[in-house]
Amino acid sequence: MAIMAFESGFDPAARNKASGATGLIQFMEPTANKLGTTTKALAEMSAVKQLDYVYSHYKPYAGKIHSIGDAYMVTFMPIAVGKNGDFILGIKDSDRIISGNLTYGKVYSQNSALDVDGDGRITKAEAVGFIERIIASKLPK
């Protein structure tokens, strides 16, 4: 729930202008396609219907998620699930390919706010720390 609140504010039609990510957990088009749908179709679904796709996306990671950080990585960059905090998610100005046409540089440019220390790299620890701070700030005091 915390990840959906952070990613979309629970709006199934939420769309990131920079990346095109759409829906409750901000599905990218290739992810939507792997689940048998499109971001356009997801945006037209109710939140309840879209939860079926959230479930399908998370299901392969059952037993591998041991923290909110790993849960967030399933959404943000599944290859980082179970990796150490120093695992690099994005590198400024890099054209090195992570998978398909996704490059470290694209991840960085679309998420540069996660580079907390400003060193031109986004690590798993920085991304997880960012989401943990957001979640903590929304908890009742």
Image: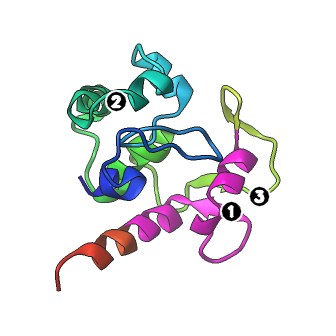
- Which residue matches tag 1? 121
Give SS at disc 3: loop
Real-space Cα separation, disc 2 to disc 1, in angstroms: 27 Å
Give SS at disc 1: strand
Instruction: Return the residue found at the far left.
Output: 140
Residue type pointed to by label 1? Arg
Q: Are marks 2 and 1 in contact (CB under 8 Å)?
A: no
Q: Nearer the viewer, residue 1 or 93?
A: 1
In which image quadrant can residue 131 be found? Answer: bottom left
Q: Are marks 1 and 3 in contact (CB under 8 Å)?
A: yes
The residue positioned 57% from the left and 66% from the top of the image is 114
- Which residue matches tag 2? 57
- Which residue matches tag 3? 92
Percent position of residue 105, x then y: 75, 49
Q: Nearer the viewer, residue 74 or 39?
A: 39
Q: How is the image coloured?
A: rainbow
Residue type pointed to by label 2? His
